[in-house]
């Protein structure tokens, strides 16, 4: 199981890196799906099967399909690769790279001070559901309203 | 009855408010009665109060209306103080003021700004009454500045002519020099003696200061500065002749009868302070003497009827200062009153002349007017006689007392007396020069004189003032209690010769004037033929070059400084702030690229900095 | 009982987050930017799951559910905006949207 964690983590990192350097948007999307599925595996290893399932279904399934629809609508694809390549020079990565490296360095610096192990206990659907429909029921309602608002505004914005 | 004293300044103030709040739109039929009537009511109240006060035999009466302000131990009240001196002043202001207001309703009848004129006039009377009735120097100063403001407004009354505005500004700025000095004097008195109530102040000064001590001299000098500014004495006399730009009733009321004598009032009111500083008191006498002589010479050369009278006013106030300087306090106040009568008479009569000749002021374009303008002629005759101290006219008694007071001074007294007598000689010459040129000789009138302007409201005041100028000398001025101590009362035994000289000298002056301007026995042209005489004439005509001197000494350096400091040095500091913020704006605006990724990058940069700080601290 | 050091899970989340950040800062195609944002959101969700495992609680998963909802709504609105932008400018290049330049 522990090996699986590191393996899935490595796949997630590599495929995400591939997303941000891809010039073909459809390939990038596939790498993103791979990354999300790897993260779902990590969730499963960490004892959160419900989250892992949602990650696979909602993220990889629903959201990225939405992306795919839009890419098809905008008719992006093979022919935009040249343009993407011209936009993506190495120089573009310098400042963001330094910034992110600094941020990550600070993060690692803080993390290195923690030295705790976590015992993996399985937290199943039942516990999560008991919380969701118990103390957090109001938050769930709010989340549904947020989704409704997203739906309405997306409809409005995408309208001709 | 005495409690009604608060009504005195209230009536004119109400009149002012009524006129000014209607925006000067009231028609003449309403504005005139309001303007003159308010002063008339004041005069009626003043007369009743004066009768009761003099009858009561009290030394003084205090009426506290309310406390004006209270700051720590400084709490001047709006408090009226009535004694002999303020009784005289209040009667002169309301009485002569009422006559002049009445006259003005006729004089200004054709002026489109009739209501505005009377609103200023009423405000002036209110301020002047505050000045003389206030029991503390703060209230006095309020009135002092109030009359200065009204003087400014009224000199520049016909503001469409830039020259009038200039004259008004000059009067305001020059008197401001004196006012500043007086304000500093008030600060000094308050800092040293802790009160500004005049009576307390005088007692405290007497108790704490030695005669001739530094503080007494400084305070007296500073107050004197204020007095010479307001009363147009040397060296601040230059504004008064130019102030004749205002309407003639203004010249009569403000620049002859009341406001310009405020300096005399101030010194008389604080005479104890001046007695503590004998050197300053003597300086007052010398200033008065120098002023009366210099303006006497100048008056002989002027050709504008009002400027002659203006210089003669300066000269007569010089007599009052001379009287103050030699300790003849009551004589000065007496002369102040008689001068108010005959000088108001002369100014109002000159107003009638000017109006009848369609605003002609040059005396060489008049002449032979005695038939055409009989009322003015009579007024001028009586006024001139009083002015030259013709025996038994009002001016004779008052001037006589001043000169006798001067003679009583030990040491320099003879010289002061001699100077005063010489001044009286010149008074005779210039007064009757004016009189003869205007009313006798050839007629040089350019416009035909249809008739003498008049009517009861113009001629009535003239007649009353004629009577006052004639018999005013017999009025008793009830000021003994005010100046009870320290007045030179040792009845100097004066020989008949001295009296004879004092009577004869003005008459000789009149006689010389007669020979030159009436019978033409001597020719002015002959006298003026020599170069020396011409340059002297020019010098005197320009008022002894004081304007030129002040221009060179003060105005020119000031303008020079203003020119080299055109880009205000102090402003450059603020300009620097502007430049810096503009530069900063120029730099920061470059960061607003409009690029979303740049904004995100700076956001992350900020995050990095905050986390770094969080880790470090 | 198997254990994983808690910092390893968090470091994985941090790396994913920074990769997403680089994507947001680097790409000019707005669709890529939106995808990178999804990565960043996902990384923060991962951090919540790690923390939940550390304490053996279910609240972390509840929080992940909230983030998921947020991401779904955000993507819906974001894609709507992209379509509108493409209609106006006929491009997906975000650098043309620079009218706020000072």
Image (cartoon, coloured by chain):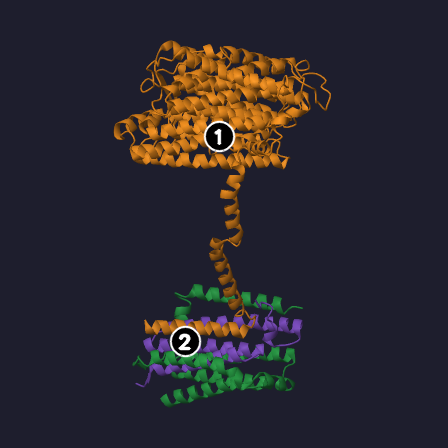
Residue matched to label 2: A125
Task: Check the rendered structure and report the hue given to chain C.
Answer: purple
In the displayed structure, does residue B23 sit left or right of residue B503?
A: right
The residue that appears at 49% across and 75% down in the rendered structure is: B601
Q: Give percent across and percent down for residue B224.
A: 40, 31
Q: From the viewer's side, name the closer residue of B584 and B290.
A: B290
Residue B40 in sight here: no
Q: Is residue B221 above or below residue C38?
A: above
* Chain name for mark 2: A
Task: Check the rendered structure and report the hue given to chain A.
Answer: green
Residue matched to label 1: B232
Q: Give percent across and percent down for residue B343.
A: 53, 20
Residue A151 is tagged as none
Q: Quadrant of the C terminus of chain B?
A: bottom left
Residue A117 in sight here: yes
Give the crowd class for mark 2: few <14, some 14-19, many >=20 residues within 10 Å.
some
In the displayed structure, does residue B263 sit left or right of residue B168?
A: left
The residue that appears at 59% across and 86% down in the rendered structure is: A85
Place residue A8 in its image quadrant.
bottom left
Q: Which chain is orange?
A: B
The residue that appears at 66% across and 25% down in the rendered structure is: B364
User: Do callouts 2 and 1 point to residues on the same chain?
Assistant: no
């Amino acid at each position: 199981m522990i090996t699986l964690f590191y393996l899935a983590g490595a796949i997630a990192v590599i495929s995400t890196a591939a997303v941000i350097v891809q010039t073909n948007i459809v390939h990038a999307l596939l790498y993103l799906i791979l990354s999300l599925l790897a993260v779902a595996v990590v969730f499963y290893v960490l004892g959160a099967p419900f989250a892992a399932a949602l990650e696979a279904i909602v993220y990889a399934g629903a959201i990225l399909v939405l992306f795919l629809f839009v890419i098809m609508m905008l008719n992006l694809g093979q022919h935009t690769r040249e343009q993407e390549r011209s936009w993506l020079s190495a120089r573009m990565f310098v400042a963001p790279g330094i910034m992110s490296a600094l941020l990550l360095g600070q993060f690692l610096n803080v993390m290195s001070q923690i030295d705790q192990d976590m015992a993996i206990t399985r937290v199943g659907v039942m516990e999560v559901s008991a919380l969701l429909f118990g103390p957090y029921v109001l938050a769930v309602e709010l989340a549904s309203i947020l989704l409704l608002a997203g739906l309405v505004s997306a409809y409005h914005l995408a309208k001709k | 009855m005495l409690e009604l004293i608060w009504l005195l300044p209230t009536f004119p103030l109400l009149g002012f408010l009524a006129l000014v709040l209607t925006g000067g739109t009231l028609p003449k039929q309403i504005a005139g009665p309001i303007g003159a009537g308010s002063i008339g009511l004041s005069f009626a109240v003043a007369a009743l109060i004066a009768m009761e006060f003099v009858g009561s035999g009290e030394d003084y009466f205090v009426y506290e209306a309310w406390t004006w302000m209270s700051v720590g131990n400084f709490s001047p009240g709006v408090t009226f103080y009535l004694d002999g001196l303020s009784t005289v002043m209040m009667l002169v202001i309301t009485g002569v003021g009422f006559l002049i207001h009445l006259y003005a309703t006729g004089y200004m009848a054709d002026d489109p700004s009739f209501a505005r004129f009377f609103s200023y006039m009423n405000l002036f009377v209110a301020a002047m009454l505050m000045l003389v009735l206030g029991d503390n120097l703060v209230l006095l100063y309020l009135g002092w500045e109030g009359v200065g403001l009204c003087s400014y407004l009224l000199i520049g009354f016909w503001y469409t002519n830039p020259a009038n505005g200039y004259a008004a500004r000059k009067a305001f700025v020059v008197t401001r020099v004196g006012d500043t000095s007086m304000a500093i004097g008030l600060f000094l008195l308050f800092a040293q003696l802790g009160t500004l109530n005049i009576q307390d102040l005088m007692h405290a000064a007497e108790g704490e200061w030695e005669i001739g001590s530094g503080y007494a001299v400084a305070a007296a000098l500073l107050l004197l500065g204020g007095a010479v500014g307001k009363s147009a004495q040397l060296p601040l006399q230059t504004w008064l002749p130019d102030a004749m730009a205002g309407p003639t009733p203004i010249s009569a009321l403000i620049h002859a009868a009341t406001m310009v004598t405020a300096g005399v009032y101030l010194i008389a009111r604080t005479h104890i302070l001046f007695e503590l500083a004998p050197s300053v008191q003597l300086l007052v006498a010398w200033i008065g003497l120098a002023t009366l002589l210099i303006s006497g010479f100048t008056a002989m050369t002027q050709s504008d009827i009002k400027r002659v009278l203006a210089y003669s006013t300066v000269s007569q106030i010089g007599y009052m200062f001379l009287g103050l300087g030699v300790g003849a306090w009551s004589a000065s106040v007496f002369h102040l009153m008689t001068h108010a009568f005959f000088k108001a008479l002369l100014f109002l009569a000159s107003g009638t002349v000017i109006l009848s000749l369609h605003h002609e002021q040059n005396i060489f374009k008049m002449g032979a007017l005695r038939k055409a303008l009989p009322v003015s002629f009579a007024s001028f005759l009586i006024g001139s006689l009083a002015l030259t101290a013709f025996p038994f006219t009002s001016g004779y008694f008052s001037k006589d007392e001043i000169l006798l007071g001067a003679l009583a001074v030990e040491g320099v007294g003879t010289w002061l007396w001699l100077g005063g007598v010489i001044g009286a000689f010149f008074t005779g010459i210039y007064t009757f020069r004016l009189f003869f040129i205007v009313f006798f000789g050839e007629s040089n009138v350019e416009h035909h004189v249809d008739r003498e302007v008049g009517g009861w409201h113009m001629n009535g005041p003239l007649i009353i003032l004629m009577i006052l100028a004639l018999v005013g000398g017999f009025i008793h001025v009830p000021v003994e209690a005010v100046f009870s101590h320290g007045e030179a009362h040792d009845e100097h035994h004066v020989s008949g010769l001295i009296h004879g000289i004092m009577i004869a000298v003005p008459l000789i002056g009149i006689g010389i004037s007669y020979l030159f301007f009436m019978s033409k026995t001597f020719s002015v042209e002959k006298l003026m033929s020599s170069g020396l005489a011409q340059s002297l004439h020019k010098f005197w005509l320009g008022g002894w070059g004081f304007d030129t001197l002040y221009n060179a000494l003060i105005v020119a350096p000031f303008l020079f400084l203003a020119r080299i400091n055109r880009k205000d040095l102090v402003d450059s500091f603020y300009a620097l702030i502007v430049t810096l913020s503009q530069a900063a704006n120029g730099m920061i605006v470059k960061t607003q690229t409009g690029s979303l990724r740049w904004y995100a990058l700076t956001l992350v940069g900020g995050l990095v900095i905050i986390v770094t700080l969080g880790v470090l601290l | 009982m198997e254990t994983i050091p808690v910092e390893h899970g968090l470091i994985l989340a941090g790396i994913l987050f920074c990769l997403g950040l680089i994507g947001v800062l680097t790409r000019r195609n707005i669709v890529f930017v939106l995808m990178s944002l999804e990565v960043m959101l996902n990384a923060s969700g991962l951090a919540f799951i790690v923390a939940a495992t550390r304490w053996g609680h279910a609240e972390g998963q509840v929080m992940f559910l909230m983030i998921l909802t947020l991401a779904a709504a955000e993507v819906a609105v974001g894609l709507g905006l992209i379509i509108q932008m493409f209609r106006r400018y006929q491009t997906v290049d975000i650098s043309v949207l620079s009218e706020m330049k000072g």
